[in-house]
Every structure is written in C-alpha cells, then in structure tokens.
Amino acid sequence: MKSKQNFKNIILYLLPALLLYSIFELYPMIQAVFLSFYKWNGIGGANLKFVGFNNFISIFQDKVFWMSIKNLGIFLVLGIVSVITISFFLAYLLSLELKGTKFFKVTFFLPVVLSVTAVSLMWKMILDNNYGLLNTLLTNIGLGNLARAWLTDPSVCFIVIVLINSWIFIGYYTIIMLAQIISIPKEIFESLNMDGAGEFTTIFKAVLPLSWDVIGICIVLVTANIMKAFDLVYVLTSGSFGPSDINQIPVGLIYYKSFISDQFGQGSALSTIVMILGISLSAVMYFKIFQKADNN
Amino acid sequence: MFKIKKAISLMVVIAVVVSMMGMTGCAEKVTSSTDQTTTSTSNSTVQDKASTEKVDLRFALSFAAADPQNKAAEVLLEQFKKENPNVTIQNESTSSSRYHDKLKTEIASDMLPDVFANWGGSEVRGAVSAGSFLDLTTLLNENPTFKNDFLPGALSGPDVTYEDLPGQWGMPFMSIVTGFFYNKAIFEQVGVTPPETIEDLIVVAQKLKDSGTIPWVVGGKDGWRIEHIYSALMYKYNGAGIAKDLASRKVKYSDPQSVEVFKVIENLRDLGVFGPNPASVDFAMEQNLFQNGKTGMDFLMNAYIENYMGAASPIAKDVGYFAFPYFKDKPQYKDEIMGGGSMCLSISANVKGTNREQYANKLIMKFSGKAGLSEFVKINALIPPVKLDNMEELTTNEVQKQFTATFEKATGNCLDITLYDQVSSMLTKTRSVCTGLLNKQLTAEQAGQELDNEIETNKK
Amino acid sequence: MKSLRVRLNYTTIIKYFLLLVWTIITLYPLIFTVVSSLKTQNDMFSNLFGLPKAIIFDNYIKLFTQIKMGRNIINSLIVSTCTVALQMTISSAAAFVLARFNFRIKTGVRVFFMFGLLVPIQSVMVPVAMIAKQVNGYNSLLFLTVIYTAFQLPYYIFILTGFMKNIPKEIEESAVIDGASFHRVFINFIVPLSIPSIASLSILSFFSAWNELLLALILLKKDTTRTVSVALLTFAGDMFADYPGLCAAVVVTVIPTVIIYILLQKNIVQGIAAGAVKG
C-alpha cells in the first residue's frame, strides 16, 4: 500500500518539473536539431527546404566558426586557470582568519551579484581608448606606451574579455573553496608546523591535495559559466562580436546567424553542435560527480 | 502551525503571480489613461472615422530618444495622437547603430513594428520577398493627392522598389546627402582650407595631425561609418554606377575597382588621418569628439545638422561644410555622390486585416506627406522627396543649403554600395569587413576576397 | 622566539597586501563609477580621477524622468521574484523525490534532467522565439518567468538533490512512525531542514533572472515591459557617449542587488559553501 501510494506522489512531485523542462527546454532543443537539416528564411516566411547536412558543412567551412571555437578554447583555458588559481589563493588567505576577513569576504563576493550588463558597461567605459580610466592612468604614471585599444586590438581584446569574466566570478569560487579549506582539521596544520614545515610547503603538500574534490567541482561550474557567457561579450563588443568577428564565441555566432544574417538553418545547425558539446560535458560531469557521491 | 506556513507560501506565490499579471495590465492602463486625459479636451470633430476602440500601434525610427532629430518626429506624433485619441503609439525608435540589428532580429522573429523606418535595398530584400512588408500600392492609389506630391522618380527609387519584386514597399521619407562637417575654428588655427581633392585632403590632414588634433574622426567601431566612406570613395573612383555593376556581378569586390579603393582607406589609416585606433571609437564617441572640438572633420550626413549646429552643440557657430573630395585624376566623377536614396517608411504585413491597418496608413501618410516632411525640413534639415513650395523659408541654415546644393548638382548618386545586391547579409558583411580593414585585421586584397566569399557562400 | 615573531609579521604584511590588492581591483571600478555618476561630462573628462568639482544629481534625475527606469526595475523585480518562487517550489519537490526514494525510473529521470545542465539558453533561442510567437508570449513577463525557470531546473535540481541526500534517514523514519503522510514529511521536515540551501539558491536564482539579457532583449519589445538589463543596454546605445549618465544608470541598476546582497550575505555564503562542499 505504501509503495503504490508513494509512487503516485512521487510522480506528482516530479510532474511540474518534468513538464516545464520538457516543453520549454527539451522541445526547443529537439526543434533546433530538426531545423538544422533545413534551409529556411525565418519565422516570417515559412519556406522550408530540406538540405540534409549542408548546413553543417557550411558551418564547418566557415572561418568565423573556427574563430569562435578557438575563442571558446582560450576562454576555457584562461578562464579556468585564472579563476581557480586566484580563488584558491584568496581562499587560503581568508582561511587564516586575519583581522578584517569578514570585510574581505563581503567585498570579494560583491561583483558576483551585480548585473553582468551593468558590469560590462562599466568596464567598457574604463577601457575606452580615449577617455578610459585605464589608459589615462597608464599615461599619467609614465607607462603611456602600454596604453592601447583594449577592446578592439586583435592581440589583446579577447583576453581582456576573459579576464573581466574572471573578475566577476572569482569571489564566488573563493567562498566555495574557503568553506573547504576551513573544514580541514586543525591537527594537520599543527603536525606540519611541528615538523618545521614552512607556509608554502603546507599549502602545496596539505591544503591543495585535500581540496582537489572541491577544485574539481569548481572547474565544472566555471565551465558551465563559460559555456553560457553571452551577455558579457555581447555588451563589451557593442553587439558586433567584432571588430570583424574577432571576439566571436559559439553562442554569439548562433545569435548572429539566426537573427542578423538570415541563415536560420545554419544557426540551428550550430545550436545542435553547441548542444552536443554541452550534453557531452554534462555526461562527463554526471559520471565524475555522481559516481563519487554514490560511492560516498 | 505548519499548515499556516504552507498556506502563507502558497498565498505569496499566488499574490506575486496575480500582481505580476495585474502589473502588465496596469502598464497599459497607465499609458492609455494619460493619453485620455491629455486628449479628452480636444475637438471631437477632427476625424469622423475615429472609433472608441483602443488600438496599439508600434512605430520605430532610427533616431535615439535623446537625438535632436527626434524633435520633428515628436511633433508629428503629438499631432497624430490628437487626431486619433484611441490609438496608443508604442515608440521603439533607437539609434542608427543599433537599429539595423534590431530590424534584422525583428524580421527573423516576425515581429516587425507596424510602421518602421528602413533603407530598402539588399538588407530587407529577403523580408520583402517573404511577404513581411505590406504593399503600399493600394494606399497610394486611394490617396492621389498624397501620391502626386512626390517628386518624379521618388516612388520608384531603389530603396522603395525592387526590379523583380513588383509593388511599392516603402514611402520615401528622407533623402540622405553625405558630406563633410568641419570645424572652422580649428581649420583657421592650423591655417588650412577645405580640400577639394583627396590629395589635398591628405595634406590638410597632415597639418591637422601635426597640430595635435584628430584630423578626420571616424567611429569605426560602428561599421556603417567606415562603410559609408568606402561607398563614397567608390563613387568618386568609379562613378555611382559601380553599385549596379557589383550587384550584377559584372565587377567583383576583389577586382581593382574595389581593391584600389580599399587601399586608399589603408593609406589614410596608416597616415593617421583617422586618428589613433579608429576602430575603437563608436559613433556616439565620434559625435562627442566633434562636438567638443577634438577633431577637424567628420564625414556625415545632412540629417545630423541639428546635432552639430543646434542650440545644444558647443561648436554650433564653428561648423562648416565641404563636399566629399574627388580624385585629382578622375575629375569626371567629381559630382558622383553617396546619397540620394532615402530612408523610407514601411508597414508590416502583419497589420493587414487588423484594426491597426487604417491607423498605420494614417501614420505613414502623416510622416511622409507634405505637411509632415515640412516639419523634418524645418527641424532636421531634411531633403524631402516631395516638392515643397516654401523650401526657401524652411531652409535657413547655410550648411543645409550647401548640402542641398551638392545634392542638386550630383551627376550620379547611390546610397550604400550594396543597395542593389541580392544577398541580404551583404550590407552587414561589408560593414564588418570595413571595420576589420580599419583595425588592420585585413588587407585591402583580403577585404575584397571576404566580400566575394560572402557572395559565394550565399549562392547555395 | 624573537626571530619567529619577526618572520610572522613579514609574511602577514605580504598577505594583507595581496588581499588589499584584490580588494582594490574589485572595489575601485565600482567606486569610480559611483563618483563619476555625480559629475558633469566636462568634469569627468577633465578630472577623471578626482572627486567631483560640484556634486550633481542631474544624471539620476534624468534617468527617472526621461528614461523612466523605475518601470524597468519593477519589471525585473517581478520576473525575478516569480522565477524564484516557481523555481524553488518545483525544484525542491523534484529533488525531494529524487533524493529520498528509490524507484525504477529514478536514474533515468536524473539523467534526463542532466541533459540540460550545460545547454545555454542562447542555443535554443530560435525555437523559443517560435514558441513565443505561437503562445503570444512576446512582451509577457509570465512567459519569460516560465522560460527562466525551465532552463534553471537542471542546475537547482542537481544541487538540491545532493543536499537533500545528506539529511539523515532517521528524521524521515521517525516522522513516518509518528504518522506523517508523504506530503507532511516533505513540507514539515525536509523543507525546513533544507532552508539554508534553498535560501541561498533562491538568491542565486534571483540574480541570474535579474541579470539575464538575451531572451529579455528578444522577447520584450515594449519599453514598458523591458527589464533592467535591456533598458540599460538601450539607454547606453542611444547616448552620445554621456559617460556620467551611463555611470548613473549602472549604479541604479546595481543598487537593488547590492542592498539585497548586504542584507543577506551571510545566508548566501553559508548556503553556497554547504551545498557545493557536501554535494
């Protein structure tokens, strides 16, 4: 009796989530895949023409697509490295419970809660070539030759964008890692101290290894954040992802293909590619984390 | 106690959902009730067709709300509201740089405003052939006075009609003339006069640069700024007919006729004529720099006379005009200009058969009829597509007269270089390539090649 | 002994230095923006680093009279709070079932939800726009709320499931022995224990809905329905490089979230730490 009754309730509790998810997330995903095999000129005119894999071929032949993949790669590598290393060291420093730690905690987390659009606009002003804070500062302290067009100079612009993203989210991961470091038993530190171990040794021989799990989770969360990063790049490049596609990212290209250049079929094909990428990474995450959790 | 908690949270959710729906409803009520109070005292004999049915009309021009050019639009919208008190106009206007993306997105999602500005040409061709634009032929035939007010040829221009798509797709609205605004004070200070040839321009620019000012400011971040320069140069180098030749593929973008012009831009760029890092300056900043006397010249259009010479502009009295210089060895193209074609107003096909259709028609006639266009001439220094009897009194500004003179003198004209192109993404691509060239990401040859590639990939 | 103390002080100074460096990197841009919003354009461009020559509030006044940002802030508030309410209700119900019970299709359902975890909203914006057209969802705050909820579901179900799994079985068992029904167990026992996690996730959900740009940009056409992110962008694009004005707009957009943050920061920090470390 209990099991049957329970099962009914289980379904009841799952239903809203399943329905919402299926209709508004899954169904669009399936539609996007379906549409990738057609050429059509937009929602207005409904002339669908079946073209098989042509859209995919066009995407793979598109220089801009490869540029966006390259940028995604830079984003992931530089983003993960900068976020994880800085967050880890900040978390360690905060774990020492120096005076004022509370103030630092509150401050570091602040950028996380601000509107990404607002923050992007703020940085856009700061990095402006003529009137921006950064260039004026550099000129004033004599480093004028370092001043450049941060957001449009091909050699640095995308890196600048990645770093701004890191600036925004480092606080979030600092707090996560801080919780982990604090939970390390004091005895470990004491015994290492007795053995005469210096600070650096303690960090690398004890704190770091004991934090691998959390670092792993953070890497996964940072990846998720980077895959979804659209607003930041859109605003910083004034919606063009340029100049001349230099700051293009996969989701940006989907937007461009679908809404700006009337190539809906290609936009959908790219959506499919991005989704496959996302799902594969999700699968990897699932096995890495759930295996571990279930084993515990 | 726990029951209460559940009840409370449930009530909170319901309250929030209800208030949210209420709010959206509230919004309409608030906007329409303010309209009611301002127009309830107006004469009810104005329009006999006025019904009491509430209608929402979506409208978009490519001027930002804060743009001085918007003043004329506001005057006309006020008049329209008085004449049609039951209609609420939802103004979705936004600045030129963002307007193109907005237009494209709306075409893609079938959400075009009811009455909206556009530039015709390749950009909206796809939408027209897909049936998103309303054919205005009936409107013209039902209003013969309105129709006959237009100057000969205006109604069949390449911005409002297509050779292979019969129909009237837009009402001519603004004729654009491009030309140089320059800062007379700075020129005098440096000791230069407005150049007549491109070669002279380079000399003038050199002197301006040496005096520490940006010679010729370009908001290269917004692609259309540099694409306009490319178009203007193309017409001075090849005559305005080159646009048709490119569209018919008689000439390729990688042919010398085009690559040589890209090289001219490269040269100007490398000489520092556009200032340092022109691709990092956007249009808003470009205007700001000119208005604050940080640059000697700005290649722009007659529509921006009010911005630079109006009461709010710091350099209003120092603004002068000169026509785009010609190539010394190509004097035959001296009067081939970029301009003429116009921004036009179109109606979305989605209004057909709805109660919005008649109001959309009224609105479009208000703006592109003689009376409406007079407002734009008066306030915006517009060159209208209609014959105005009082042109002389409306044109008081010296610079406005000079723009008009250039237009009337032109031996050939065309708007953007991709006006006749059949590939709808050509305009966006050209603008992107021009920015890339300006930013040293592409060479002249590569620029031409990229454009040809765009044509190739869109052939499939 | 003496040398040890000296060494401690030296390293402590370096640590403070590093912390302060990051504090400056974090706070200075924000402070700069606030200070700049109180200047006129001339003041800002000629006196970039200094305090305002004369403090003016014109930029803020312009925001609320000309641009009418108040309306946009309210819209964002509505969408964000509704998203949170809907999200937490639905996710915790689903997480409860997935965490505390075993049934045949459980793993299947979990995997089913995982599909969407790393799929960005932008990759399906065209189908979403099509659905919006069909159900008349344009300019509808309700539709936007539903979409946000749907896309955040995998993430919150994932975290809440992990958290609820860690609640000791004894609590549930004793509740059942006392005669509590299925629903009672959930509402009176599991939910109260999950409050820290739910509270902090609510805050995250709120912020992610508040800050979302693209879908709001595409779906909200009327300026009376626009959210803050979209209004900010429109405002920024239409200005003649009026930087102080833009700074004011940024500040105004950011203030509500800062206030909520400062009031609730303890919960946020606790909850995230708990959820991520245990999960």
Image: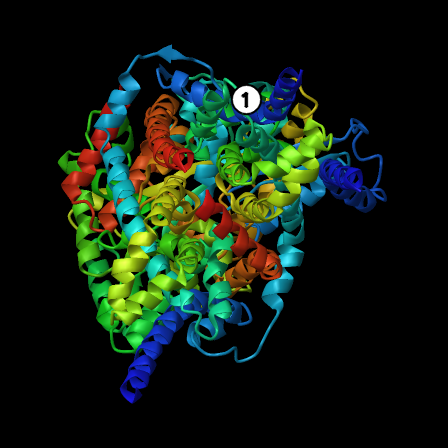
Quarter of the picture holding the N terminus of chain A:
top right
Q: Position of residue C72 (x, y in %)?
A: 63, 48
Parent chain of label 1: A
In-front residue for pair B131/B74: B131
Seen at 52% across and 45% down, the residue is C208
Q: What quarter of the picture does the C terminus of chain A occupy?
A: top left
Q: Is residue C1 left or right of residue A168?
A: left
Colouring scheme, one of rainbow, by chain, secondary structure, one colour:
rainbow
- Is residue B229 positioned above or below C5 on the image? above
Callout 1: few (<14), some (14-19), or many (20+) C-alpha neighbours within 10 Å?
some
Can I make out residue C244 in this image?
yes
- Residue B25 position in % (x across, y down): 74, 36
Q: Residue at x 48, y 37 (%)?
A: B102
Of A190 and C85, nearer the camera is A190
**Percent coordinates x, y for residue C10 in the rendering:** 30, 81
In the rendered picture of this protein, how many numbered marks are placed on residues? 1
- Whether C55 is drawn above or below B9: the answer is below
Classify mark 1: helix, strand or loop: helix
Location of residue B412 with respect to C14 vertically, above or below: above
Q: Is B372 left, or right, of B304 in this rendering? A: right
- Image spot of residue B420 (x, y percent): 34, 28
Amino acid type, label 1: Ile
Residue A69 quadrant: top left
The residue furthest bottom is: C2
Of all residues shown, which one is farthest toward the top? Answer: A50
Residue drawn at (47%, 41%), measured in percent from left and top?
B99
**Which one is nearer the viewer's eye here, B379 or C69?**
C69
Q: Nearer the viewer, residue A30 or A68?
A: A30
Q: Which residue does the numbered mark 1 point to in the structure image?
A: A23
Residue B324 visible here: no
- Quarter of the image for residue C182 reads top right
